[in-house]
Amino acid sequence: GAGVSQSPSNKVTEKGKDVELRCDPISGHTALYWYRQRLGQGLEFLIYFQGNSAPDKSGLPSDRFSAERTGESVSTLTIQRTQQEDSAVYLCASSLTTGLETQYFGPGTRLLVL
Amino acid sequence: GENVEQHPSTLSVQEGDSAVIKCTYSDSASNYFPWYKQELGKRPQLIIDIRSNVGEKKDQRIAVTLNKTAKHFSLHITETQPEDSAVYFCAASGVTGANNLFFGTGTRLTVIP
């Protein structure tokens, strides 16, 4: 079946602008995660959704970052007033449930803030 | 929170030799340890994982060992091939009971033909 998809694949924006990134999880996956990967570095956890429960926002680096998810479908990650240090690849992953399930990653959105 | 350290950051081996990558974690409550392979410009792909109720798992040329007492786990690749060249990330499950992963900083493996 279809894997995790993300859009756009690339985004170039100017400092101070808002951006919205989209993630479509694998159908039937109740858990959805956002990670950030700076160039040459590991993946940094941002936020996690599980079904209709309140999201775990503990990884969000500042209040400029927010994310939403409607039910068990699409999620959007919004970065307001972007800064150059926000430049990174933003990866979304989904898993069947929580509790030691494999996370499947999307291709990522490469964000460049000029 | 959980802290995962990974070594080495770069590793070069001759084709056919073995490669070993090591990780340590800080939170004894972590109980799931996946390894991901990421080729240049591609998404991370799960290659093997281990849960805390076992000490070793093997899948063809890839094996992972876990020492819960010492809080470290390792990836072993035998008979390396040029297509094994990639960045490998270890990860450990979070402390909250959720499944969010804390990743190591990665190991760039180069297999020299």
Image (tube, rainbow, N blue to C red):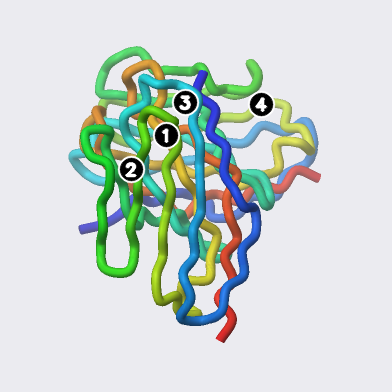
Q: Which residue is mark 4?
A: A80
Letter of the chain that mark 2 sits on in the rendering: A
Residue A26 rendering spot, x and y as whole percentages:
27, 46
Within-10-Å neighbours for mark 3: few <14, some 14–19, many 20+: many
Q: Secondary structure at mark 3?
A: strand
Closer to the chain start, of discs 4 and 3, is: 3
Query: Residue B92, which numbered label?
Result: 1
Q: Marks 2 and 3, Cα distance to the nearest angstrom? A: 14 Å
Q: In the rendered image of this protein, does residue A1 appear above or below residue A14? A: below
Q: Is residue A76 visible?
A: no
Q: Which residue is mark 2?
A: A103
Q: What residue is drawn where x is 25% and y is 38%?
A: A101
Q: Which residue is mark 3?
A: A47
Q: Nearer the viewer, mark 2 or mark 3?
A: 2
Amino acid type shown at disc 2: Gln
Q: Nearer the viewer, mark 4 or mark 1?
A: 1
Amino acid type shown at disc 1: Ala
Q: Marks 4 and 3, Cα distance to the nearest angstrom? A: 16 Å
Q: Secondary structure at mark 4?
A: loop
Q: What residue is drawn where x is 53% and y is 51%?
A: A8
Q: In the rendered image of this protein, does residue A81 appear above or below residue B112? A: above
Amino acid type shown at disc 3: Ile
Q: Marks 1 and 3, Cα distance to the nearest angstrom? A: 16 Å
Closer to the chain start, of discs 4 and 2, is: 4
Q: Secondary structure at mark 2?
A: loop
Amino acid type shown at disc 4: Gln
Q: What residue is drawn where x is 44% and y is 42%?
A: A92
